[in-house]
Amino acid sequence: MSWRKLLRSIQVFFPALQDTRFALSRFRQKAARRLVEPDFAALRLFDWQETPLFLDIGGNRGLAADAMHLLVPAARIVVFEPNPYLYRQLTRVYAGDPSVTCMDVALGDASLDTVLWVPSYRDWIFDGLGSLDRRAAAEWLNEDRLYFFDSRYLRLHEHPCKLRRLDDLRLSPAFIKIDVQGSELDVLRGAEQTLARCHPLLMIEDASDEEKIEFLRRFDYTVANFEGNRLKLQQAGKVNSFFLADKHIARL
């Protein structure tokens, strides 16, 4: 039995607890300094400039941005979150923090108006599965991830969405985290000039496939896995992979 699958299957019957769950995760991370994603601890390995710019692409509920602030308090953070419900939550959470800017746009390899698809099951909204790809949003929830899955309870919610290229924003980031439900390569393609100009440290979810690794190799990036409090070069991570430019490798 998969405990993660069991927990996911139970939680869909209690949609009212969804916001409470994330509020507790945020409190635990801030109060107990326990990172929701341990991979973020890799940020401690580097000496950052006085006020580095970090980008959180796929901000969701702000747990990643909180981790960045916990580890590098002086960082300025721009959070990109196209889901309107999550964007409203983020703007409330960071309303009093001038170091965090929230943008209600998705990043990709084009600039246009499109649609964000967000699945729900038995009224539990899986906002972390929001995708510009309707099929990807619809197919993640299935019998492999939920016990007693019944497709009659699956819904897709459609939200108008602005898609932009990172290059068009002319930002100079020192670190970029990308978690966009399978559209990571599109984000990178829209950031070619930024990568060539700034060579930021990258943390990318599900970047073990050779296509992403080969794409970033064009910009002299080396893939690395964070394990045992150190980055192991030439290894992709199980959940997140880091990509280091030569300047990062020299600092290790």
Image: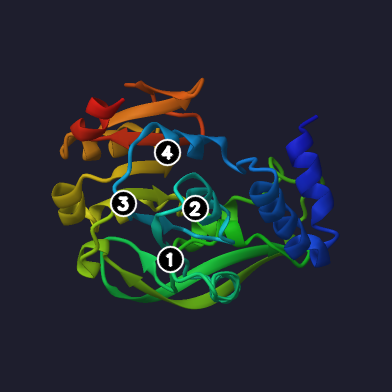
The reply to whether the C-beta atoms of the residues labelled 1 and 4 are less than 8 Å apart is no
Q: Which residue lies at the image location 42% right of the left edge and 38% below the top edge?
A: 43
The amino acid beneath tag 4 is Leu
The amino acid beneath tag 1 is Ser
Observer-nearest of 228 and 114: 228
Q: Which residue lies at the image location 80% right of the left edge and 29% below the top edge?
A: 1
Residue where numbered disc 4 is placed: 43
Picture quarter with the C terminus: top left
Earlier sequence position, callout 2 versus callout 4: 4
Quadrant of res 210: top left
Q: Is residue 20 above or below residue 142?
A: below
Q: Point out which mark residue 69 bears.
A: 2
The reply to whether the C-beta atoms of the residues labelled 1 and 2 are less than 8 Å apart is yes
Q: Classify 10 Å Cα crowding around label 4: few (below 14), some (14-19), many (20 and above).
A: some
Q: Classify 10 Å Cα crowding around label 1: few (below 14), some (14-19), many (20 and above).
A: some
The reply to whether the C-beta atoms of the residues labelled 3 and 2 are less than 8 Å apart is no
Q: Nearer the viewer, mark 1 or mark 4?
A: 1
Residue where numbered disc 3 is placed: 50
Residue where numbered disc 1 is placed: 99
Earlier sequence position, callout 3 versus callout 2: 3
Q: CA distance from mark 3 to mark 1?
A: 13 Å
Q: Nearer the viewer, mark 3 or mark 1?
A: 3
Q: Secondary structure at mark 1?
A: loop
Q: How is the image coloured?
A: rainbow
Q: CA distance from mark 4 to mark 3?
A: 14 Å
At which x and y percent is residue 206? 45, 39
Earlier sequence position, callout 4 versus callout 3: 4
Residue 221 visible somewhere in the drawing: no
Q: Secondary structure at mark 3?
A: loop
The reply to whether the C-beta atoms of the residues labelled 2 and 4 are less than 8 Å apart is no
Q: Nearer the viewer, mark 4 or mark 3?
A: 3
The reply to whether the C-beta atoms of the residues labelled 3 and 1 are less than 8 Å apart is no
